[in-house]
Amino acid sequence: MLFSRRHSPTHKLILNAPQPSLEAAARTALAGGQSRARLFEHNGQRYVVKRLADQSRGLMQILFMRWLVKRITGQPLPLRTLALNQAAGGMDYEAKRLIDLAAKGVRVPQVALVMPEFFVLDYCGTVIATLLESWEADTWRRELVRQAQELGEFHAAGHWHGGAQIKNVTLQDGQAYRIDFEENFGEYLPLAASQAADLVLFLNSISLAGPIHEAEARTLLPRLLDAYFAAHPAPEVKAVIRRTAPMFQRFARFAGLFQRWSRKGIRRVIILSDILSSV
């Protein structure tokens, strides 16, 4: 399961205490390139330093989110609710979510340091999207089913990710850690809609990834759905998927006209549309 590493008193002391040497090492790592996240070592331990993302949303994005909620659930969110959630976002949104999830027992990177413009995390292994490239077929079939089950367990505990693709799940010592909580769209949506979005992102990130060809994807994705819903039966999530499936199908038919110019993206949309229509 994805709930074992509790937020310890030691971690809180480290987070709240001045750490000039760790801060200096993190600043040096960030100075080495333009990417928002950099891996570095300090006192024999590996860390990731990440520049904080601005999660503010423009008016058009807020209105689109309101339309989307109405389309998915049949009821629009009040603009006042969206405005309050907009105010709740900010430059340190991701760091706050990581600390909150860790306190609830979710396996996420521990936050070691928060500064006005960046934060520092424990390194928690290699992302599954990279590992998939070198795994044997038996390994990735088994591991991806496990990840579908763990996503279901994560959702069953009342959480949502916002970026549940396999590029945002790492493995270290056989345990999975969720990373990258920049997206705050789940603050705008009902929980079932946010969880359905997670599930769609997860499935789409696996289809045609690495060694997974189309025939394999069409066999594997239904198994992943079964594993997910076994851990999280969630009729509300199924209802969201059934409600949005016709939109997926229409988009897939339109996108299919341009398939010859797409390497994988449109094929993934078509495969996903077919799989979701069976839910």
Image (cartoon, helix red, strand yellow):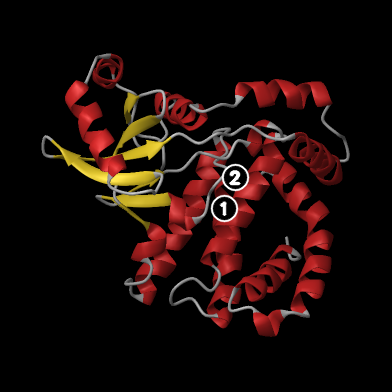
- Percent x, y for residue 203? 58, 61
Q: Position of residue 172 (x, y in %)?
A: 28, 49
Residue drawn at 49 percent across, 29 percent down? 97
Residue carrying label 1: 228
Q: Residues within 10 Å of mark 2 (few under 14, many from 20)?
A: some
Disc 2 to disc 1, how far (Cα)?
A: 6 Å
The answer to whether marks 2 and 1 mark residues whose Cβ atoms lie closer than 8 Å is yes
Q: Position of residue 162 (x, y in %)?
A: 57, 43
Residue 202, by quadrant, is bottom right
Residue 108 seen in this snapshot: no
Outermost bottom residue = 260
Q: Who's the residue at 42% across and 34% down the image?
A: 106
Q: Nearer the viewer, residue 160 or 123?
A: 123
Front position in the image: 192 or 77: 77
Q: Please tell me whether mark 2 sits on a helix, a strand or a loop.
A: loop
Q: Which residue in the structure is indicated by mark 2?
A: 232
Question: Where does the N terminus fall, quadrant-wise?
Answer: top left
Q: How many marks?
A: 2
Question: Which residue is most to the right?
Answer: 74
The residue under label 2 is which amino acid type?
His
Q: Is residue 151 above or below residue 13?
A: below
Secondary element at image label 1: helix
Q: Is residue 95 visible?
A: yes
Q: Give the residue drawn at x 74%, y 53%.
A: 241
